[in-house]
Image (spheres, rainbow, N blue to C red):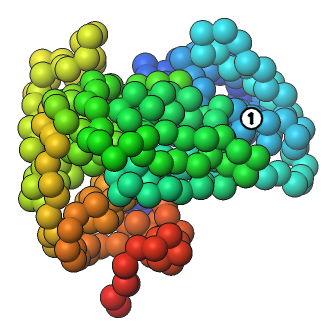
Amino acid sequence: LDDRYVASAKNGLRGAKITFRYPSVGATENTILAAVLAKGRTTIQNAATEPEIMDLIIMLQKMGAIIELGANRMIYIDGVKELRGIEHSILPDRNEAVSFACLAVATGGKILVKGARQADLITFLNTLRRIGGEYRVTNEGIEFWRASAKSLKPIDLETDTHPGFMTDWQQPMAVLLTQAEGTSGIHETIYEDRFGYTNDLNLMGADITVQTKCLGEIACRFKNKGFYHGAVIRGATKLRPARLTVRDLRSGIAHVIAALTADGESTIDGIEELDRGYEKIDKRLKNLGADIKRVQ
């Protein structure tokens, strides 16, 4: 058991007051799942409030849980003895919707993302429209395209907890901003080291500098800690093909969008990471007209 973590509660779990220093999605989900069958009341202070959290609460409530939402990121859970089976449809993936939206605008195409929900994407949709992207909400989902053939417009943005701009959206957005005429800035306030992929975009011809300075109007929790959590993107730059290796899931989709934006053939290694979050991505891109081939 040297390389494993083992947790046990011989007498069962009991309710508790829990305060998060930061509103983590994973921590909130796991605490809710533990609390619904614990004895007594659990109070979560500074909980995450992402749509996925709300959907989890709705599902558990259907199953017999007692969960209440309070003001200022408070969640109250009264434990129950058992849960029952139900039928529940999960939310569409917000990150997939944003990825395909960025792909449409970057390549000058038009993509309808079926099932995408405007209510879950308000902050992204505002950002996309500000830089020159456009969208139309339909009964099927949301259709995305570039508003005109002209270069996109630069923007300064910073990632934040919901309802702010998601950290998982900044990688595909960075590719778009390489095609914007002027200087853009991205201030990453969620993760301290998430700009490694910019080295790959620079290899393809982008002009991106990362720095430890806070780029937002308000200093974040990484101030003066030496973390490279700010990116300055100068554009527009013509992207060229390259051989890339996927660093993680979100940087991987940025690689794909950049490769499809560039003139010429690119090779991307380590695509099994992409498969973790984008099912049959090569087949779906082919259906959109991309010239893409998976090599075993």
Q: Is residue 267 visible?
A: yes
From the image, which quarter does the C terminus lie in?
A: bottom left
Q: Is residue 189 above or below residue 9?
A: above
Residue 173 found in image quarter: top left
The residue carrying mark 1 is 57
- Within-10-Å neighbours for mark 1: few <14, some 14–19, many 20+: many
Res 11 → quadrant: top right
Pick whichever, 42 or 277, lies toward us: 277
Query: In which image quadrant can residue 252 be found?
Result: bottom left
Amino acid type indicated by mark 1: Ile
Front residue (pair 139, 51): 139
- Residue at image position (52%, 48%) is 144
Q: Quarter of the image for the N terminus: give it.
A: bottom left
Q: Is residue 243 above or below residue 112?
A: below
Find numbered disc 1 in the image and state the secondary structure of the residue it sits on. helix
Outermost residue to the front: 149
Q: Is residue 179 left or right of residue 285?
A: left
- Is 49 left or right of 152, judged from the image as shown? right
Q: 201 or 40, which is in the foreground?
A: 201
The answer to whether one can see residue 5 in this image is no
Residue at 25% x, 30% y is 154
Residue 79 lies, with reference to residue 10, above or below; the image says above
x then y, percent, for residue 201: 17, 54
Q: Nearer the viewer, residue 227 or 79?
A: 227
Would residue 72 appear left or right of 204 to someone viewing this image?
right
x, y (%) of residue 244?
19, 68
Q: Please tell me how many numbered marks the rendered image carries.
A: 1
For the point 29% across and 42% down, the residue is 150
Left or right: residue 188 versus residue 97 is left
User: Which residue corresponds to the image point at 66% horizontal and 55% vertical from the top-left?
Assistant: 114
Residue 68, percent from left and from top: 78, 20
